[in-house]
Image (cartoon, rainbow, N blue to C red):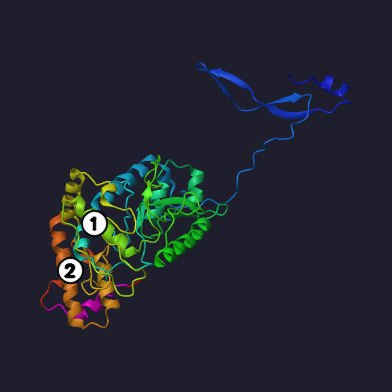
Amino acid sequence: MSPASSDDQDSSSSEPETRTYAPHHTQRHGQRRESALTPSILETSLPEQTTILKAPPQYECRTSRRNPGEPKAWCWITREASDHFHDYFKALMASWGVTSDHTATCVLLSEDWRPAVPLDLMALFSAENVPLAGSPRAWYSYRGFGTSLARAIVWFSKPRRAIDLDQFLECEEYPPMDASHLCHHEHCVVHLVYEPANVNQERSECQRRARFLRAEKRAVPEECSKHNPPCMMQASSYPPVPHAMIVPNTKQRAAVTALEAYYHQFAVLSKAHGFPPLPYINRPRRYPFPTIEAHLPSQFSTINLEKAKLASKEMLDECTTNAKKYRPDLTCSFCVATSLKTYATIIGLWAHIINVHQDIENKNRVEEIRRCAGLWYTYWQLHSKGGKRTNPTLVKLEEAQAEDFCWSDVLNWHVRWG
């Protein structure tokens, strides 16, 4: 019905008119579609159930420190960023002997372990140097913005919108969002789901219950009944889903300890490379459970190596070849017995030796600094293509090679800590 004229409106004062919006249909390319709503005057009033769009939230846009005036992390919604991350994650998982959609076992990765070669870690690993709870989580950065690797995994699980980025950055109008670990292992990069932080915190109760039941030698349910997706309290088959990297297709017990999960992880890595099974270990003293299930197949659950999605030989060979090109592992020999930790920079390792191991004689610390400097200097000579001879780090490397290098030279470096 077309709008009434002004004369008609003046003569129809007895019945009030109501303005609403009726859908206007158009035809384009052989398909019927509904275009933007166009105004019309109807003789009846609005229906009782009418959807009214809310005004968009108003908040200040966060800007980049690296590029002032540019929205913070805007490039994280681009296809380029997604492709870059998936290539990185695929190579990272292959270095641990599995594909990027592997879910049969946890892959635990702290920031202390991220720079290291997994095969080297396996040679040094023991029950005494397991990364402690609360160790820094693995980090991922791209184009000047960084976050935990777990949050990056859930973010790049599907295409994202600009409004999703605002929520990811926790702008004022949005609740904090977490990458929740369904397996309850804080360093796992496999069993993840993106959900509000308060829901993530509520999952802690499921882990406590699962471990209580195991300690009491009672049956542990396959999954919790409080959350969706449910917490993984017992291993069993699960139907595949579209985003296998985020929502797992195998459930893992929340009652499995970090020590057991690390041994499962190295067992999978060993099988991928065709190495013999890992040697059995005895139950440590004061272990929280009656048995230790560090070997597969597990007596406590149905976790086994047959469910692991192993990386192809080509991917394993590529990882091995690339590992030889990478910089040497920066590991403190003073800490290997109690903490297996690697450093991203030689300066960070030196600062650790200088400030943390003050109980060790200076001459021993000098020898450790000289050893690390020798490894890094050899790497620089092979891969730097000349480099900048005046680089401050290179100057220190050359000083450490001198025969008269001593502790006073180390102090003169004024290496920052923390």
Residue 117 in sight from this viewpoint:
no
Residue 219 in sight from this viewpoint:
yes
Q: Report x, y in % for residue 244.
A: 37, 44
Residue numbers of the magenta segment: 404-416
Residue neighbourhood size for the residue with mark 1, other residues' Cα within 10 Å, grouped as few (<14), some (14–19), many (≥20): many
- Nearer-the-camera pick, 97 or 10: 97
Q: Report x, y in % for residue 270.
A: 20, 55
Q: Quadrant of the C terminus?
A: bottom left
| Residue at figure coordinates x 60%, y 44% from the top left | 56
In the displayed structure, does residue 284 sit left or right of residue 225? Answer: left
Q: Tell me the amino acid under the disc marked 1.
A: Ala
Q: Tell me the amino acid under the disc marked 2.
A: Ala
Residue neighbourhood size for the residue with mark 2, other residues' Cα within 10 Å, grouped as few (<14), some (14–19), many (≥20): many
> Which of the 4 image quarters holds residue 188?
bottom left
Q: State the SS at label 2.
A: helix
Q: Which mark is residue 401?
A: none
Question: In the rendered image of this protein, does residue 64 appear above or below residue 6?
Answer: below
Question: In the rendered image of this protein, does residue 328 appear above or below residue 29?
Answer: below
> Closer to the observer: label 2 or label 1?
1
Q: State the SS at label 1.
A: helix
Q: Earlier in the sequence, mark 2 or mark 1?
A: 1
In the displayed structure, does residue 236 sit left or right of residue 6? Answer: left
Q: Are marks 2 and 1 in contact (CB under 8 Å)?
A: no
- Nearer-the-camera pick, 418 or 393: 418
- Nearer-the-camera pick, 294 or 321: 294
| Residue at figure coordinates x 13%, y 59% from the top left | 381
Q: Is 295 in the magenta?
A: no
Extreme-left residue of the structure? 403
> Which of the 4 image quarters holds residue 262?
bottom left
Residue corresponding to mark 1? 267
Residue corresponding to mark 2? 373
